[in-house]
Amino acid sequence: QLQLVESEGGSVQAGGSLRLSCVASGDIKSIYCMMWFRQAAEKEREGVALHYTHYNGSGYADSVKGRFTISHDIAANTVFLQMNGLKPEDSGMYYCAARRVCGSTSYTLRTSGVDYWGKGTLVTVSS
């Protein structure tokens, strides 16, 4: 089992920045990638960014490339999501997630196949 706990989100104006963190505890060695997903009101949950935990690789959804950066503090078992240049359409619940089996960015950022989810944290971007 793995537990994922996200940091508190926040509210910013468009163009601002936020950093989310997710602390993992439990069976960490079985996890090969950690991801961030988000879900806006009345929309489906979508993958945003992923980090391959066994090597220094990452991937991003097209909608956040160049603005979001995912990073991993191995010693602290923590994954971060640095979000810059935030837009109102970035608003929503952000979820930390983990998988034991990973693949390409598009494959890994699907909601199906996620083994563990955090409870989510709210990000609000005002125009």
Image (cartoon, rainbow, N blue to C red):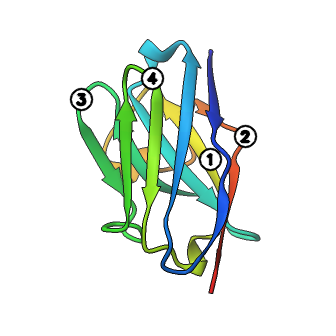
* Residue 89 rendering spot, x and y as whole percentages: 58, 77
The image position of residue 32, as x and y in percent, is 38, 26
Sequence-wise, the earlier of marks 4 and 3 is 3
- Residue 66 in view here: yes
Say the numbered circle drawn on residue 119: 2
Labels 4, 3: front one: 4
Assign a secondary structure to mark 1. Answer: strand
Of marks 3 and 2, which one's residue comes earlier in the chain? 3
Figure check: 1 above or below 117: above
Instruction: Tell me: 90 left or right of 99.
Output: right
- The CA span between labels 2 and 4 is 20 Å
Q: Is mark 3 in CB contact (under 8 Å) with mark 1?
A: no
Residue picked out by circle 3: 55
Q: CA distance from mark 4 to mark 3?
A: 16 Å
Question: Which residue was labeled with disc 4?
Answer: 76
Pointer 1 with pointer 2, Cβ within 8 A: yes
Which numbered disc flags the more N-terminal residue, 4 or 1? 4
Q: Nearer the viewer, residue 44 or 84?
A: 84
Number of other residues with Cα within 10 Å of mark 1, as a class: few under 14, some 14 to 19, many 20 or more: many
